[in-house]
Amino acid sequence: MSKNVLIEDQYKRTSLFEKENVNYLVRVLKRFNTVPKINSINIIASSKEPSLFKIIPGKAIKIGELFLEQPVLALIYLRYGIEWQIWYKALGKDKNNSILCDLAALKVTQIFYNLLQKRDKEKLKNCNYFLINIIKHNTDFNVEFLSKYSEFQFFHGIATKNKTVKDDWQSILENLAVPTEYLLMSGGDLRLNVDEKELLNKYGCRPFPRPEAFTFASSTATSISNFAYDRTDKARTILIQKSLKNGFEKSSIEFTELLKSNLRKALKINEETQIIFSPSGTDSALQIAAITQIVTKQDITHILVASDETGSGVPAALKGCHFENTTALNYPVKKGDTIEGFREVDVIKIPLKDEHGDLKSDNQLDNEVFNAVTKTNALGRHAVLHVMDQSKLGCQSPTTTLLENLKTIDNVSLQVIVDGSQLRLDPKDVQNYLNKGYIVTITGSKFFTGPPYAGALIIPKSVSEVVESVEKKLPEGLNNYYNSIDWPQPWFCSKDLSDGFNYGSYMRWNAAIVEMDRYYKTPILYRNLGIEMFCNFVKASINDAPFLQPLFGNEAKINMYNKEEFGLRNIRTIFPFFILKNNEVLSLEQVKKLYVLLNSDLSNEFEGAPIETVRLAAQKCHIGQAVNAKYHNNQSAVLRISLGARVISESWVNRDISIYFRNIESQMDQVTIIIKKIELLLDTPRLFN
């Protein structure tokens, strides 16, 4: 069955294809790619009726050539029509409630319009079209509002018999009558907001695919792939259908349980392991802090290893303090204030680097950790040891030997938390930690390149049983952070958390799990060879560039054919580097500026230059954002080129070995271009002003 015919299939060559309009048209068509694809819905361009916009329920959308001459206008109308068709199909056999389709389509289209780039909205500034005027000048859409305008019924020709909206439909409209790209930005905090010019968030990502950028930013965050976006968009459509048929709450619970089941399958962990989704890795730290508060009566000390390379909000979260000015459920709070219900705790920070910015030795770090646990235990306090595997710069600490030695401490009261937020781990590594009774924190938004943020706690059976037996409630202030449905249902402690569902978090995890699934479908031999091939090239490329200074050593090579040893956690996949100009390191602010310039189209800054230079300047290059670091006692920052799962999975897309390695080489070429663009920026100092 064919999906809806894309708008570009309907174009005849018109004045739109004149040179000055081509780039504009291409940009609009790329945005059209985020519009859902529906089976058997055709989009038909009409020259006979140039001002026509008509929805043929369940079959087609007709749009006149006058709309197509203004692509942004056509984009808005088509988004409305396709969303209407999604809800119409979801109604099943009962088509008497088309008012629901009108409401949903209008709500989605307004959000879609708000997420257009500023320059595209300006194209509609002087447009006098019904739908544009409605979404620009109104906010409260309901049945009473729609009944004032016959134009809505004129679009599809159905006389609305039932003009009431069922109570359960309100929840469906609120949660699912939202474009997928907006869902991917919701249920988090202000860090997910995008600017109106380039639609990039704080991490240089879009909430929809950005294939034009070379992307090796998996140590920070990555824009969603086309593959994962399409799968997530389809998940929203299916959820609409199931919610209208079986009820919103039942369908939502089934969806969250399916996500957890799929995550367990991907990581090969057993059903008795509990999973708690969270809006971010920092939220996972807050969840750990809350659980610790109720499972022990002792005073608590969190020992935070790699405190200089974990999330900036983690120390505050462990203390039970607000780490942003809004919560994931969109409640305003004051950053730094104690969250209601948390008692005071201590946090011991153990940074990986010394005061000169040099990485401490394994022995030094192990000694610091052992001493911290010993002293905490001597004071009669409960120790929560946060182990790092791996940090944002690719480091691990403490050693496994040290973790074993902690068992020798008499009567130690200790819970180990493994910070696996980068998820540069193989399933066997996660299983090993869980078997030891360690809680593991992961995200799907780092190595696996799901959209930011997608955090989760994985809790082993032994710990879950302890929490389940506790008859205390979690701190009251967490009602503003989490919904009870996201916590294990057998647990008494979370029963009083908020009602509702965080669909932003779910959709981000859906995308991440899709990426996990296709990564693991790559045969392990080719996967490991591809990883070794790519990482060796990145390492050599950084070492060979005289203006880059690597912040990584010559780690011992692992025999990639020894399946007992080769794995993500024992090969470097994050490559941080300083940037030098005339043998002097760039300042922190210069590095931050270079990061932004690298991720931007700068072709306008090189008019008249050779075409190769203009093309290089135009290429958007997204790598890991700046991390503060010292260079010979001078404050600076490093950027990072990182291996992400897509380097492997998108290379294996054709399931052909020769093409697979050629695709890996193509991505290695992208790394070369990134380094060349860094050199171009260094040779153009005016760009830093």
Image: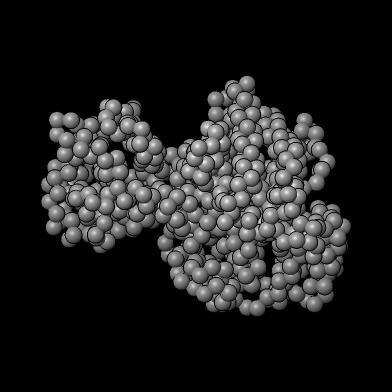
In the figure, residue 417 lies in which quadrant?
A: bottom right
Q: Is residue 644 visible?
A: no
Quadrant of the rendering where the N terminus is positioned: top left
Quadrant of the rendering where the C terminus is positioned: bottom right
Q: Is residue 559 above or below residue 599?
A: above
Which of 375 and 81 lies nearest the eye of the viewer? 81
Q: Position of residue 209 (x, y in %)?
A: 47, 42
In the figure, residue 491 lies in which quadrant?
A: bottom right
Q: Is residue 485 left or right of residue 344?
A: left
- At a point 63% along the width and 22% down the height, the residue shown is 657
Q: Is residue 633 visible?
A: yes
Q: Is residue 574 left or right of residue 165?
A: right
Q: Is residue 536 left or right of residue 122?
A: right
Q: Position of residue 234 (x, y in %)?
A: 40, 41
Q: Is residue 91 above or below residue 342?
A: above
Q: Position of residue 565 (x, y in %)?
A: 78, 38
Which of 604 and 118 lies nearest the eye of the viewer? 604
Q: Is residue 342 left or right of residue 178?
A: right
Which of 650 and 66 lies nearest the eye of the viewer? 66
- At a point 48% along the width and 43% down the height, the residue shown is 604
Count of numbered tags: 0
Q: Residue furthest front?
A: 608
- At a point 53% along the width and 32% down the height, the residue shown is 611
Q: Position of residue 455 (x, y in %)?
A: 57, 55
